Image: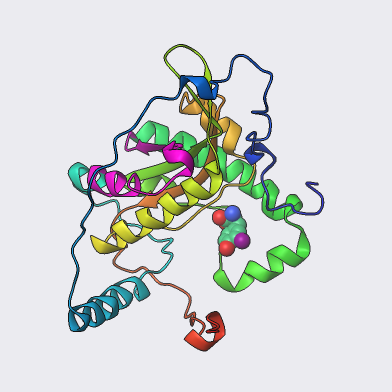
């Protein structure tokens, strides 16, 4: 399998299907409690306001770019807390909230993360990715040297929890954990854009297990994404990419 889809990290293998019946260390449905349903009325905007808000949000999000040159200038901790609270508002399978956001500001830990990622990425670029993949990335001028990993004031490592573990030790199925955490990552990116911070969605191939151990996370957590977060460096550049037009991304039936 790894031969055909080298960009799918072995370590990310989902174990939702492992949660089959018959194993008594998993919670069973007889233990489910009742839940009240309460009225819900979010704000409703007049059409003109909707039109304006849809444009304004698009304008904001269309300015988002993956930035690989991040300033070491400090960022208020409260802002990071709030963007992570925002990410945690994502919908999740059976409301299991199967995410862990590890925020790293400790300089020594950031350097250790950089060491692990650069060592693996060198092997990725030289061997695992293969000529075609490396060729497809050439125009982005990326390589295995990742200065942003110890320059950025914060690294946010997003782990998906393949299952939950209850106080009584029983395992809880985390349905759709990967798409749930992926959605929360999208919301996190929007929240960062909203406060004028930048990041790059890095997915360090083959680094998951080592980073999980470094950060002392349990075995049911798998690294999905690593986001270096900060202000853009004053001399930051980005590739001059264009986005597809509406007609190229939407079909209306
Ligand atoms: N993970 C590597 C390689 C890489 C892969 C893709 I697909 C990109 O869009 C960009 C980079 C790296 O971070 O350099």
Would you say residue 38 sits in the magenta stretch? no
In which quadrant of the rendered image does the C terminus lie?
A: bottom right
| In-image side of 34 versus 216 (left or right) | left
Residue located at (77% from left, 63% from top) = 131
| In-image side of 165 versus 77 (left or right) | right
- Can residue 143 be seen here? The reply is no
Would you say residue 99 sits in the magenta stretch? yes
- Is residue 92 placed above or below 168 in the rendered structure? below
Count the marks: how many?
A: 0
x, y percentage for residue 205? 63, 46
x, y percentage for residue 151? 36, 49
x, y percentage for residue 3? 82, 50
Residue located at (67% from left, 70% from top) = 136
In front: 43, or 234?
A: 43
- Is residue 135 placed above or below 88 in the rendered structure? below
Ligand 1 quarter of the rendering:
bottom right
Range of magenta residues = 81-106
x, y percentage for residue 61? 34, 71
Indicate how the structure is coloured in the image.
Answer: rainbow
Residue located at (68% from left, 29% from top) = 18
């Amino acid at each position: 399998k790894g031969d055909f889809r080298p960009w799918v990290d072995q370590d990310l293998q989902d174990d939702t299907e492992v949660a089959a019946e018959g194993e008594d260390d998993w919670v069973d449905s007889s233990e489910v409690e009742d839940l009240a349903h309460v009225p819900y009325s979010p704000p409703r905007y007049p059409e003109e306001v909707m039109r304006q808000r849809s444009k304004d949000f698009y304008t904001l999000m269309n300015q988002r770019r993956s930035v690989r040159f991040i300033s070491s200038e400090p960022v208020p901790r409260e802002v990071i807390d709030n963007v992570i609270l925002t990410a945690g508002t994502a919908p999740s399978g059976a409301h299991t909230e199967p995410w862990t956001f590890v925020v790293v500001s400790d300089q020594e830990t950031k350097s250790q993360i950089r060491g692990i990622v650069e060592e693996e990425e060198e092997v990725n670029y030289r061997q695992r990715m293969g000529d075609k993949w490396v060729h497809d990335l050439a125009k982005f001028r990326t390589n295995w040297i990742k200065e942003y990993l110890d320059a950025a004031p914060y690294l946010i490592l997003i782990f998906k929890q393949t299952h939950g573990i209850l106080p009584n030790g029983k395992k809880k199925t985390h349905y759709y954990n990967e798409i749930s955490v992926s959605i929360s990552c999208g919301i996190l990116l929007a929240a960062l854009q909203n406060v004028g911070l930048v990041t790059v969605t890095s997915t360090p191939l083959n680094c998951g297990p080592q980073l999980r151990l470094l950060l002392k996370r349990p075995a049911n957590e798998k690294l999905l994404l690593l986001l270096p977060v900060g202000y853009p460096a004053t001399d930051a550049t980005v590739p001059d990419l264009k986005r597809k037009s509406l007609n190229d991304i939407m079909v209306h039936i």
